[in-house]
Image (cartoon, rainbow, N blue to C red):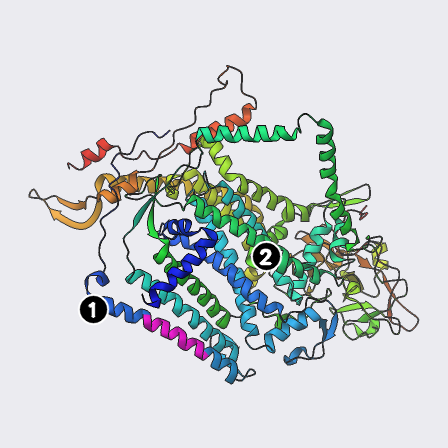
Amino acid sequence: MSAKETVPAAVANFVDERTGAAKWLKKNLTKVFPDHWSFLLGEIVLYSFIILLATGTFLTFWFDPSSKEVIYNGAYEPLKGLKMSAAYESALHISFDVRGGLLMRQIHHWAAIIFMAGMILHMLRVFFTGAFRKPREFNWVIGIGLLTLGIIEGFLGYSLPDDLLSGTGIRITEAIIQAFPVVGSYLAFFVFGGPFPGESFIPRIYTVHVLLLPGIFLALITAHLMLVWYQKHTQYPGPGRTEKNVVGYPLMPIYMAKAGGFFFVVFGVIALLGAIASINPIWMYGPYTPGQISAGSQPDFYMGWIDGLVRMAPPLETHFLGHTISWNILIPGLIVPGLIFTPMALYPWIESWITGDKREHHLLDRPRNVPNRTAIGAAVMMFFFVALLNGGNDLIATHFNSSINHIMWFARIGIFVLPVITFFVTKRICLSLQRADRELVLHGRETGRLVRLPHGEFVEVHEPLSKEELWKLTSHEQPGALALPETDINGVARRNRLVSKLRANWSASNAVQIQKPTALEIEDSSHH
Amino acid sequence: MSKELNPIENPGLPAHTPRQTDLDPKAEKRAERQVASLFMLSALSTVGFIYSYVWVKSDSYTFIPLLGDMNVQQLLLGLFMAGGFLFIGIGAIAWARQLMPDSEVIAHRHEFRSSDEDRKEFVETVKTQGAAAGIGRRPLIKRTLGAALGLVGLGPIVLLRDLGPLPGKQLETTSWKAGTRLVTDPGDRPIKASELEVGAVVQTMPELAPGEERTLNNTAKDPVLLIRLLPEDFNLDSERLSWTHEGIIAFSKICSHMGCAVALYEQQTHHLLCPCHQSTFDVTRAAKVIFGPAARPLPQLAITVDSEGYLVAKQPFTEPVGPSFWERNSQ
């Protein structure tokens, strides 16, 4: 036998005799993954995380996380002779004196933006297609955890260079910590090692940014992927696909080549962005000093919505018995984000409680077929959109020459009104799309071909759909309303009447659907 | 649950349609060459990357439309790195799509729920093994263990105490004292009232004693904005009016909302605007909040002139500067 044949066998033998992995590998190397572009979103997040680890490690070789004051004497002329922190100086050093350093900084920052954006898009895909349903609730919760930690990790990351912009962000964070009732000023003094800004914060968040949070990320991502592996991927409904199977391509070789190739593509695209698109040019902001600020101070987009909420908050403080509670900080900075993220994490259970559906689901929903969920998702997106928009109200005002006060009032009212409008509009759109599906099933596709009949009438020829297309449009379930009697099975009145009434109403609203065609109707229509 | 069953039968997996590369050996060869060329391009990019690292000067800049001034070396390194990765990726995907088998396969799923028997045995195991420890029979152990576990976490929390000092009065005090001169920032030059024209704005700091250094901690609390208006523009009560000097009024520059520097002054309207959250303060009415999320005016510093005619603080701030905190007495 040639070496080509003996070497793999020898390696396999070596590994298997020590681990007994042959059986597991044999099975899993041909594991089937369904194919769809929207399944790539999660992959983008995973790959940008790997890029973040690699480029981040590179940056730590030069970055000095210290607030010690130094005089700048590097390659960037305009800042020469200025007092600054060692952190800012070393970030400038990476940008101007280390070959490829600026590139690595920019790739790191772009990868962070794509990491966050990818996570949000992946979450939206999972939400709108119902992929979070049983048995995948754990992964939904892990995902919400990753998203929350991602916001914090990103914020700490862009705070590290200690430039004028990021220092302003730290100042705001300090004010939020200080706003905690009772313990606020103590917490702030502990976190900052004394009064703001002190010299402890940068080295402390450095440890959190490069060790603690990445460690937690690794653990959570591993658990997330193991669950995906073990539970097998969901799939979109289609011909040949059922709740009991997975239709797709085997891991080896197709997915190895495709996913491996996709990793390189993601890295390539981010490297391209890092090469040509300047991001966070810290040398333009100058070193941080609390007495100065640059106009148009903006956080990165994943923090921008909180900033937008803070901006639109009413000027409310409570003063009593010599104490102060800053509602203008607590409400937008802590209470509202908590009120949004908690139901978000619990959503899989909320939905299954309302629908009474406790079954496993592996076939995804088309968003139009679940109008209420889709409408909730759209409404929440609108909420974040208005908040984010208000986070950039100063830039909008200067770019579009409008009044900042008008934009703020628009946001203050819009944050309540627009999500409600969005809910109803989305729901109507979903129902219209269902109606269009029904039309398509019963009357076929419009071909655009006009035919004149012998008696002079013109008709457009409709082409019937194939069996596969018909299946796609009709295979979904249409839930009925949950029957919730006033009394339980023992005839005892239910406790919490209000809650069960709410549940019944919501469930009835879920059941508002355009009736999908029956077999009889399809049969009938094929005879015209 | 559903109102009716599916109106049509699942038609099953559609028949596989062969690709051009499956049918035509020429197309297959062409695809193979394409993939190989992509991999070659990646290799060339890496050579280009190393060339740029070693031989391109690191301090030359060039202007590129839309992108602005770019460092040539960083740009080339980035482009070649992107090429090195992108071409491998595109090549691998092209390989998978055009040359690897593309018929879909079906794998089966199984419900995750274990069999009733297994579940019963599991519960039994937990019960019997748990009973072996006898935790139910030994409430003393159960309770003391609970107490110990509840308390043991306190150790690490207590350890965190030394992260920082207690706040004391530090949030409530600044470096300003009666008689402290206002000096320009930057420049550290004392200011005479006559130097300020109507409409002028100057950022000031408290004057340092000889040999004293200004720390960032002080810079976070001490900055004061001096603004000169026409005295008749003011709309102040008599006390606050007495804190001004010939139309010059002084406010803390640290926003009463979240501590940003309130840096934008509109001369026409006499408004101060914080660029962080757009809180707007009316200078003529003792920095009253007229818009935005701030709940309190900017603290006003009482000023006068000393014997040499330089502006000085008449007294320290009468309230804490910067954002609110629990212990702040705002009555």
Query: Same chain, marks 1 and 2?
Result: no
Q: Amino acid at mark 1?
A: Lys
The residue segment tinted magenta is B36-48
Q: Where is residue B221? Give x, y as percent.
A: 78, 61
Asked whether residue A385 is in view, the answer is no
Quarter of the rendering containing residue B283: bottom right
Instruction: Give the crowd class for mark 1: few <14, some 14-19, many >=20 residues within 10 Å.
Output: few
Q: Magenta stretch containing residue B39, yes or no?
A: yes
Determine whether, in the image, residue B23 is placed left or right of residue B267.
Answer: left
- Chain of the residue that carries numbered disc 2 in the rendered image: A
Determine whether, in the image, residue A310 is placed left or right of residue A504.
Answer: right
Q: Where is residue A404? Give x, y as percent.
A: 59, 57
Residue at the spot x=33%, y=35% of the render? A514
Q: Amino acid at mark 2?
A: Pro
- Chain of the residue that carries numbered disc 1 in the rendered image: B
Q: Magenta stretch containing residue A160, yes or no?
A: no
Q: Which residue is mark 2?
A: A214
Residue at the spot x=93%, y=71% of the render? B307
Instruction: Give the crowd class for mark 2: few <14, some 14-19, many >=20 residues within 10 Å.
Output: some
Quarter of the rendering containing residue A17: bottom left
Q: Identify which residue, A116 or B276, lies in the foreground.
A: A116
Quarter of the rendering containing residue A182: top right
Q: Where is residue A10? Give x, y as percent.
A: 40, 61
Under circle 2, the secondary element is helix
Q: Where is residue A267? Give x, y as percent.
A: 46, 65
Q: Which residue is mark 1?
A: B26
